[in-house]
Amino acid sequence: MTSKLQLTLACGDYEIIRPLKDGIVKPDGIELNILTGADSATRHWRFLRGQYDMAECSGSSYIVSRDRGMPFHALPVFPHRRFRHGFIFTNTSANITKPSDLIGKRVGVKFYLATATLWLRGILENVYGVPHKSIEWFAELDEDIAFTPPEGLTLHRLPDNKSAEKMLAEGELDALLHPDIIEPILNKDPRVGRLFPDYKTEEKSYYDKYGIFPIMHVLGIKQELVDRHPWIVPNLYQAFDEAKNLAMKKMRNPRLVPLAWYQEAWEEQERLLGQDPWEYGLSDSNRKNLETLVGYSHQQGLISRNIPVEELFLPVSQGRKRGTFRT
């Protein structure tokens, strides 16, 4: 009996991954050992130190890794996207009511390379006119990939006994850009609010103007595996795409989710973002999305050049009209 190639994949426990995790979808010739226990920051850090064959990886850190010539590549599979305007948190005593009020302020981040904060710094600078170097930055964690802050950038590393969320609530920081909903917001702490209280309206306006539903993560893979087994690339891509399509079809059932207005939310998403806002591959909209992210990374001095999208992602094509059944 021919054995399958065994690969370890670390990723989030998402519905669009679940058919792979449950074994409903199986990539041809590959047996996946899927790990979902690590949080995002830990998973990215470990992958970029070679601890997994494949992983859902920070788009920002992956772009830096390619600029450094590190031994990783990626498939155009994007397990996580999120609008980010609702993740700019402020101390309510800091008199920050509009983006320009952040200029000259003390602003925390989980870590500087985090994709969420790269998007936010880029949006603040290019949409709202807030230069990233006009802010004094404070990072809580060490970086996925160590880097020297570019000239003119003020970046402090918080000591281990300091929490950026607590510092924000206590007024030691004026604002915080974070990938997640922070504890003071969950606990309704009156000392902490959002820069954009009506963030959904701001995000819809951003999408209407720019057509970008921000890509956060990519599917990273060790380069040595691609070199040894090039056939795995299209096989993996097909499996991830099939899993996503099955999940999207399943999630149309409003009985699955305990939300009173789930169906309305689903219909609103389709109306605003189209039938498949989570699409994989290098479509025109995904290419614009990724080129914007690369541009922000270069603008902020994190990479040495604007890396073409074709250099970042492995080709998954099997030729025109191949790889599908005739109908």
Image (spheres, helix red, strand yellow):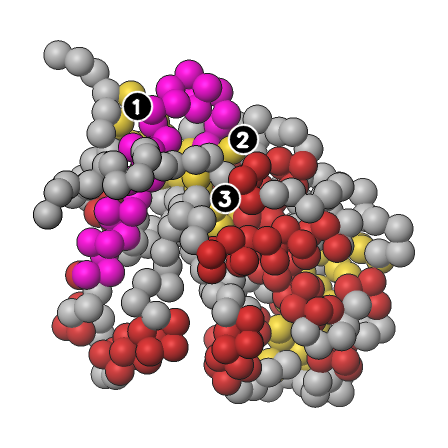
Residue pushed farthest front?
Answer: 320
Q: Are marks 2 and 3 in contact (CB under 8 Å)?
A: yes
Q: Residues within 10 Å of mark 2 (few under 14, many from 20)?
A: many
The disc at residue 57 is: 3
Q: Is residue 233 shown above or below 194?
A: above
Q: Residues within 10 Å of mark 1 (few under 14, many from 20)?
A: few
The disc at residue 6 is: 1
Residue 184: image location, x then y, percent: 56, 75
Tell me which label, 2 or 3, sits earlier in the chain: 3
Magenta stretch bounds: 220-249
The disc at residue 72 is: 2
Give me the residue at 80% from left, 43% from top.
148
Residue 257: image location, x then y, percent: 22, 71
Tell me which label, 1 or 2, sits earlier in the chain: 1
Give me the residue at 55% from left, 62% from top.
179
Residue 111: image location, x then y, percent: 66, 53
Nearer the observer: mark 2 or 3; the answer is 2
The amino acid at mark 1 is Gln
